[in-house]
Image (cartoon, rainbow, N blue to C red):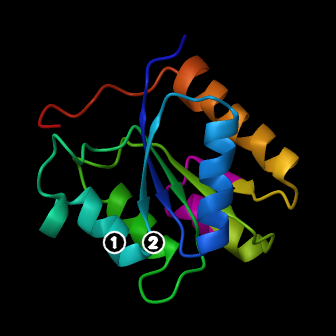
Amino acid sequence: MPKAAHILLVEDNRLDIELTLDAFREAHLGNTVHVAKNGEGALEYLFGREQYADRVHYPLPDIILLDLKMPGIDGFEVLRQVKSTPELRRIPVVILTSSREEGDLALSYDCGANSYLVKPVSFEGFLKVVQQVQDYWLVLNVGPPKEENR
């Protein structure tokens, strides 16, 4: 049985948030999913600002599921800041988006994305993606060592 992980879901669409959380519940995954509803909220969480200063209640995630197209601070900027910060750069960032644009794909990898997944349209497809993310990133993959000050 895999260890319980902390996942940060960064998504501005309420329906996609509900779909993702439902898929995690349906797959019976024992992970804690923290939700940031925009890029600014994601950065506040990741940098431990405001309400997220308590790392016992808001630990750094083991993986980030990141939408790209958000108003204000978009997913690309969140990705840039994560990958340019020594304490955060080793956290795997999986882009989870509806965009199939080649430019978005290229820029995501240029900014340091670890994976790029296009959101399936059906719940069954989404459930399969969630299970595969769990199996690969949290079970099979041997992640990098944690930063010393994490």
Q: Is residue 20 magenta?
A: no
Q: In the rendered view, tell whether residue 82 sits above or below residue 32.
A: below
Do the residues under discs 1 and 2 have CB atoms within 8 angstroms? yes
Q: Which numbered marker is on residue 129?
A: none
Residue at 47 percent of width and 33 percent of height: 31
Residue situated in front as seen by the camera: 80 or 131: 131
Kindly indicate the quadrant of the structure image that contains residue 15: bottom right
Find numbered disc 1 in the image and state the secondary structure of the residue it sits on.
helix
Q: Which residues are magenta?
A: 107-116
Q: Is residue 115 magenta?
A: yes
The amino acid marked with disc number 1 is: Gly
- In the image, residue 34 lies at what x, y percent? 40, 52
Q: Is residue 49 visible?
A: no
Q: Residues within 10 Å of mark 1 (few under 14, many from 20)?
A: some
Read off the residue under disc 2. Answer: 37
Kindly indicate the quadrant of the structure image that contains residue 44: bottom left
Q: Is residue 143 left or right of residue 67?
A: left
Residue at 19 percent of width and 59 percent of height: 52
